[in-house]
């Protein structure tokens, strides 16, 4: 308030405490409004028809990725089993040559 002089500066200094108090009230009102909006949104999203649609959408998106992961795991296991069998076969050949 350094640039203010005269009646305007005096008016702002007098109402400073009052403005701060009304700011707190405004903050409470804003908070209350946000809480009520949040409650309405949660209630809407938790309704059975919306919840069911959301679950179906998640299932549709998740199913291909889960199936893909299963296929990758199966391929990894198969590859590891083949490598083990190959090593075992090489070991048997080596042991047979030593005899």
Image (cartoon, grey):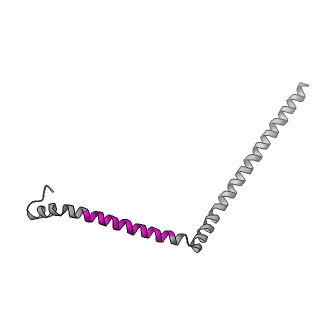
Q: At which x and y percent is residue 55?
A: 61, 67
**Residue at left 73%, top 47%?**
76
Quadrant holding the N terminus: bottom left
Q: Is residue 55 above or below residue 73?
A: below
Answer left or right for 72 relative to 52.
right
Depth check, front residue: 57 or 75: 57
Q: Residue at x 34, y 68 (%)?
A: 29
Residue 46's x, y, as percent? 55, 70
**69 with respect to 26 (left or right):** right
Please identify the quarter of the rendering in which residue 4 is found. bottom left
Nearer-the-camera pick, 37 or 28: 28
**Quarter of the image with the C terminus in it:** top right
- Toward the bottom, the furthest residue is 49
Q: In the orientation shown, which residue stands out farthest toward the right?
A: 99
Query: Residue 82 at x, y = what percent?
Result: 79, 43
In the visual, does 8 lie left or right of 38? left
Tell me if residue 32 comes above or below residue 70 in the rendering: below
Q: Residue at x 79, y 43 (%)?
A: 81
Tell whether position 77 is magenta: no
Q: Is residue 28 magenta?
A: yes
Q: Residue furthest left?
A: 6
What residue lies at 21% left-to-right and 64% top-to-bottom?
Answer: 18
Residues drawn in magenta: 21-42
User: Which of the 4 quarters of the picture holds residue 89?
Assistant: top right
Marks counted in the figure total: 0
- Examine the residues drawn in magenta and state their main secondary structure: helix
Q: Give x and y (percent) for residue 60.
A: 64, 65
Q: Is residue 3 left or right of residue 66?
A: left
Q: Is residue 97 above or below residue 24?
A: above
């Amino acid at each position: 308030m350094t640039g203010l002089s005269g009646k305007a500066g005096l008016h702002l200094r007098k109402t400073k405490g009052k403005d701060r108090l009304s700011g707190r009230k405004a903050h409470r009102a804003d908070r209350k409004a946000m809480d009520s909006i949040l409650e309405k949104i949660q209630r809407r999203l938790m309704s059975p028809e919306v919840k069911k649609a959301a679950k179906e959408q998640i299932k549709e998106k998740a199913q291909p990725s889960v199936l893909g992961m299963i296929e990758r795991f199966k391929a990894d296991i198969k590859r590891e089993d083949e490598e083990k069998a190959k090593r075992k076969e090489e070991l048997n050949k080596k042991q047979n040559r030593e005899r």
